[in-house]
Image (cartoon, rainbow, N blue to C red):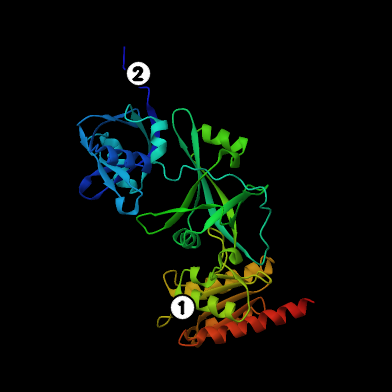
Amino acid sequence: MGLVFVNSLCFNGGLIAKHKGSIALTLYSTPFARFLLEKGINKINLKFCNGKFIVGLGEDRNVTVQRQSHNHPLCIFSVTKLIPSELKKNLFFSNKQLKVDVIVEDIVSGEDLRKYNHSLTSILPDPSIKSIPENEKVDVGCLISCSRTKNSFGYTFKVRHKILEEIALKHKKVILGRNTNGNFIIRKNDQGKEFHLYKYASGTPVAYMQISSQFITDSEKKLFKSGKRCISYRAFLSEKDFNLDISRFFTYREERELAYALLKKGAPIKIPRMRLREADIILRENNAQIEVTNVLPREGENKNNPHGEGMHINGRLCEGFLRAVKKEVPIYFVVFNKKWLSLNWVRQLVEQVKPNVVAIGTDFEKGWEDEVSDKIIKTQKSALNDRI
């Protein structure tokens, strides 16, 4: 008769191929890593069975703990000799991380592990949160992820965005609500809860907090029980609540400079939503879009070279025209380096896409953003007046 393990916990793990042909397993549980550190456990037994890793007490394998300086430690194990050769080939060929289950047996119970989870206090839905005014709304992507133990589920609310990184770093407390579409609403409140923060190796920030099961619908619980690990939604927060300077959160310098100039002159803007085909800057007043690009033409540049910058400029102007013609946007601005206007085909195309697309050439040198923002504001006001 085999041993019966009373304290069996299931965690998410990740397999990835490292340099020099090695394979590493990451066990994604900060509380478990904290437990091992406090107890001085630096060796374990590890085996691979039916596509899962089984971790137990023993002296078979060293435990490496990373990210201790951020107080978000994770356990890393070398498993190069433990997994089948076919799986190794797949890992090196795909060059991607593979999700796996890691079963921890008879080391710690779920109840004992709870005290090592610093984010365990779950935030509850606040019924007082209804909505955010449109002129204050910031739209970001978010995730609900699920962690499983033997007898229960835990739910985490996560946002990958620099705005939430700033909110977490400044230790601003929040309350959460959820609307009928499933999207989350984040409001600042001194009686609320702080976000925790960590960063991927790529530098991408993730703000997260434990949320109550009361946030989770019955249909979502069924999905998680069937094995789904995360669900994507939108989250809304207020610029006014958090005193945000939206211009700081655009990706490129040119975008940030133009965004700041527009805000300074009283033109409200929005950050485009991730994964949607939107331009770099959105004007709140009428949802007009602004594309900003500072690529330079090469000698003899033309729009038909698939590897040239001309294809990029041609694409921005034509895509803007299609969006405006389809009435996806009222007007589309393309701000680009004025050196392109020395090319005959660019000048012809600029004329062809008028008035749906407003092309603005600039040198992107000192003060360029003030001149361009003035043109955008003037053009937008004129367009609005024409529609009245």
Element type where label 2 sits in the image: loop
Name the side, left or right, on which 12 lies relative to 387: left
Residue 81: image x %, image y %? 21, 36
The residue closer to the viewer here, 230 or 132, is 132
Q: Can you say which quadrant of the picture contains the N terminus?
A: top left
Can residue 249 be seen here? The reply is yes
Residue farthest toward the front in the current orientation of the protein:
191
Q: Does residue 70 lie above or below 144 as drawn?
A: below
- Tell me what residue is drawn at x 34 percent, y 47 percent: 94
Counting residues from the N terminus, which is met first, the one under dot 2 or under dot 1?
A: 2
Residue 294's label in the rendered image is 1
Q: Amino acid at mark 1?
A: Asn
State the image coordinates of residue 174 (x, y, percent, origin top left): 55, 55
Number of residue marks: 2
Q: In the picture shown, does residue 52 fall above or below 247?
A: above
**Secondary structure at numbered mark 1:** loop
Q: Is residue 29 visible?
A: no
The residue under label 2 is 4
Q: Dividing the picture into quarters, in which one does residue 124 lie?
A: top right
Task: Residue 241 in the image: state x and y as whole percent.
Answer: 59, 63
Q: Residue furthest top?
A: 1
For badge 2, the amino acid type reads: Val
Task: Depth check: give the residue in front, 139 or 132.
Answer: 132
Q: Is 121 on the left-hand or right-hand side of 105?
A: right
Q: Is residue 175 above or below residue 87?
A: below
Q: Local crowd at mark 1 within 10 Å, few (<14), some, or many (≥20)? A: some
Task: Please state which of the two labelled residues, at mark 2 or mark 1, is closer to the viewer.
Answer: 2
Say which residue appears at 55% left-offset and 80% top-offset: 261
